[in-house]
Amino acid sequence: MKILLIGDIVGKPGREAVKKLLPGLIEREELDVVLANAENAAGGSGLTPAIYKELIAAGVDGITLGDHVYRRTEILPTLEAQTNIVRPANLPPEAIGRRWAVVTGKGGGEVGFCCVLGRLFMQPVDSPWRAVDAVLAEMPSDVRVRLVDFHSEATSEAQLMGRYLDGRVSAVLGTHTHVATADECIFPGGTAFQCDVGMTGPHESIIGRRIDRVMHATLTSLPTPFDVAAGDLRLNSTLVEVEPATGHATAIRRICERLAN
């Protein structure tokens, strides 16, 4: 089974990259399931119902979110109603949305997935370790293929989560920093790992935002809108191949597709 996780989709440019590049990628790589982190898909922060539908129509099977999950409150009914979108599992129990989901791939196999927030250099949240344990215990035992999107800032914490889950999930793939890391590997227990998948959107930018805006704010300390940039559109993703019977990863590969101007 081939599973693709698309890194943080940033604004309209990121969505354009997905719509134009994903169909060809699905066909070329013969992908079974496509997951995407979409917490920055609406103007660089949050997600709306219309954009959720747009991404699903483009070929995304399941959506993960992150620390901007509730930035657009209009997404709340979608989080309650749809079965293929998850909020971070280590938010309080009262938080709106699913903690995990299962989608069916093109070949008929099922993939369970969830996301959890890191705590180093992030806003306070519940323990990601206890949350992911609870999620794995709740997932149907016959869903052997499982992917965790670890939305975190620190590479050390991401590596620790990968080691913590080695042998218990098919993949632990990081999002949030918008910078792809070159540390993809398969741990001894059969879990594929990468600290951060990277960003889908404008790379002529500061992690997706206009360079001049970020520079001005940094040099002057004046309030400045961090508008989404527009140049050098790329789709960053990671492809994991999994043996369905065991849930163990057999291959992992970074993919970066550039949208021609």
Image (spheres, rainbow, N blue to C red):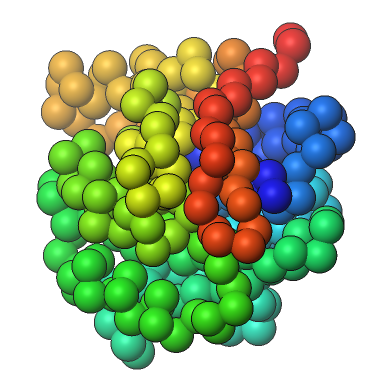
Q: Which residue is drawn at 23% across and 75% down?
A: 130
**Screen quadrant of the C terminus:** top right
Residue 112 in percent (x, y) is at 57, 68
Residue 133 figure quarter: bottom left
Above or below, comparing residue 19 to residue 38 in the picture: above
Q: Which residue is drawn at 55% across and 28% down?
A: 253
Q: Which residue is drawn at 74% across and 11% down?
A: 260
Residue 103 horizontal side relative to residue 216, left or right: right
Q: How many marks?
A: 0
Residue 201 horizontal side relative to residue 66, left or right: right
Q: Which of 140 and 231 is in front in this view?
A: 140
Q: Which residue is drawn at 24% across and 66% down?
A: 128
Residue 66 figure quarter: bottom left
Residue 29 horizontal side relative to residue 64, left or right: right
Is residue 49 at least partly visible in the picture? no
Given the current orientation, which residue lies at the most extreme bottom position?
94
Residue 198 in percent (x, y) is at 45, 31
Residue 86 in percent (x, y) is at 52, 69
Above or below, comparing residue 13 to residue 219 in the picture: below
Is residue 124 at least partly visible in the picture? yes
Above or below, comparing residue 66 to residue 219 in the picture: below
Q: Which of 107 and 83 is in front in this view?
A: 107
Residue 122 horizontal side relative to residue 244, left or right: left
Residue 226 in percent (x, y) is at 38, 33
